[in-house]
Image (cartoon, rainbow, N blue to C red):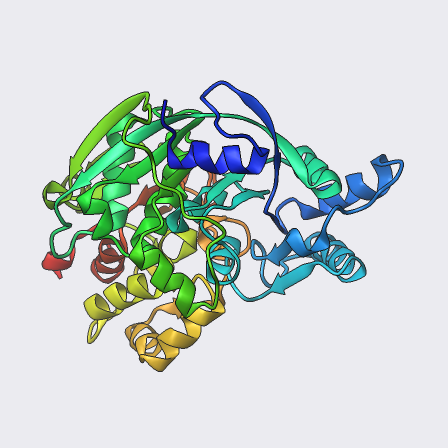
Amino acid sequence: MGMTIAEKIIAAAAGVDSVKPGDIHTVQLDRLMSNDGTTHLTVDMYNNKLKNPHIADTKKFVFIVDHNVPSDCPKTAASQKKMRDFAKENNIDFWEGKGVCHQVMIENYVRPGELIFGADSHTCSYGALGAFGTGVGCTDFLYGMVTGTSWVLVPESVKFNLTGKLPEGVTARDLILTIIGEVGANGCNYQVMEFTGEGAKTLSISDRMTLCNMAVEAGAKTGIFEADEKAMEYLKEHGREPKAVFHSDPDAKYVREYTFDLSKVRPVVAKPDFVDNVVPAEEACGIEINEAFLGSCNNGRIEDLRVGAEIIKGKKVSDKVRFLVVPASQTIYRQALKEGLIDIFMEAGAIVMNPNCSVCWGSCQGVIGENEVLISTGTRNFKGRAGHPSSKVYLGSAATVTASAVAGKIALPSEI
């Protein structure tokens, strides 16, 4: 029986010829990433719970401060200092103020064929480059830190065969929300969402990140693409070589298969309070908003900022709305500066923030108040996700979010 890309990565990490869903294997981890959301807890366990604390291989570790940047209170400052000091003492790569962890990882570390654990649920983003990335908790992260290994229950794979090409004005964000709306928030629990087909080849690395990033919102263990010519070109531009390039075998087994014709995808919105509560964007149009957010590890890349800037150029943000624009990394921020995008947003009345998780995290920037409404390119719209429990979060594309910021209500670009 043939194997999928995900199964081949696990087999290689386990040092065996083949694996199948349901097997449990001990695997060597290629890299581990942790951010300021939980790293202080891992450091406490390392210092206070281990008899013989040590790190298996410091070169495999990356610590990234991205959730509360700059720190919002003394408690946050203390937890970040603990993380900062630990990284320095143990010679761990440390990033602060440079962007959202997953964007930083894709830009600087991730290679096809790697098995990566991250102490963040959206680590599944790394499948955009043909790596197996998955989120883990502090205890699993600590075990990986000390041993360099972990155990993996081999997941089943679900094939998403993509055909056609996205129409003008329709984005990968609309596509992944459409997919989640169809399969459901629990539709791929502990499974791999493998995106393939001729349509998949038309998607940019940014688009692929958008799809893989939100695989966890369908319950998936990870999302993954085959590392093709576009992935190789991206790696070359960023000075890296693949660890290994795997392709799913023709006789690989999938538990289910779906086909999505990209040419038929239309703008959509996920209504509160569930990511799979997806409707055509027209059905949400007219709902008044208080805030709009363009950013996050899902939609804060240069392509998203270009879309937003093109829509808002020469217009003004509604006086009823706060519009926060947050590039996903410093690299993206500087590119946006070079292209004049930041000027366009600021002239329109947007608030341009430093690269960080910002409104998506709902902790240190753009927190919304009682009964307020946010439209966001963030990853989640759960109750209270961005502020007060009575507030409401709608999820949409960069285009829909920007148009809504101008209109003062949920709107499509054609309406403004």
Q: Is residue 45 above or below residue 410?
A: above
In-front residue for pair 28/67: 28
Q: Position of residue 153 (x, y in %)?
A: 54, 24
In-front residue for pair 368/75: 75
> Residue drawn 11% across and 52% down?
167
Quadrant where the C terminus is found in the figure: bottom left
In-front residue for pair 13/362: 13
In-front residue for pair 203/333: 203
Q: Position of residue 292 (x, y in %)?
A: 33, 55
Q: Is residue 177 visible?
A: yes
Q: Number of callouts in the render?
A: 0
> Residue drawn 63% across and 55% down?
62
Q: Is residue 352 above or below residue 105?
A: below
Q: Is residue 257 left or right of residue 343?
A: left
Residue reaching furthest top? 22
Q: Position of residue 135 (x, y in %)?
A: 54, 38
Q: Quadrant of residue 38?
A: top right
Q: Is residue 317 visible?
A: no
Q: Quadrant of residue 148?
A: top right
Q: Is residue 241 above or below residue 45?
A: below
Residue reaching furthest front? 17
Q: Quadrant of residue 138?
A: top right
Q: Is residue 98 above or below residue 153?
A: below
Q: Is residue 31 left or right of residue 162?
A: right
Quadrant where the N terminus is found in the figure: top left
Residue reaching furthest right? 51
Q: Position of residue 238 (x, y in %)?
A: 45, 67
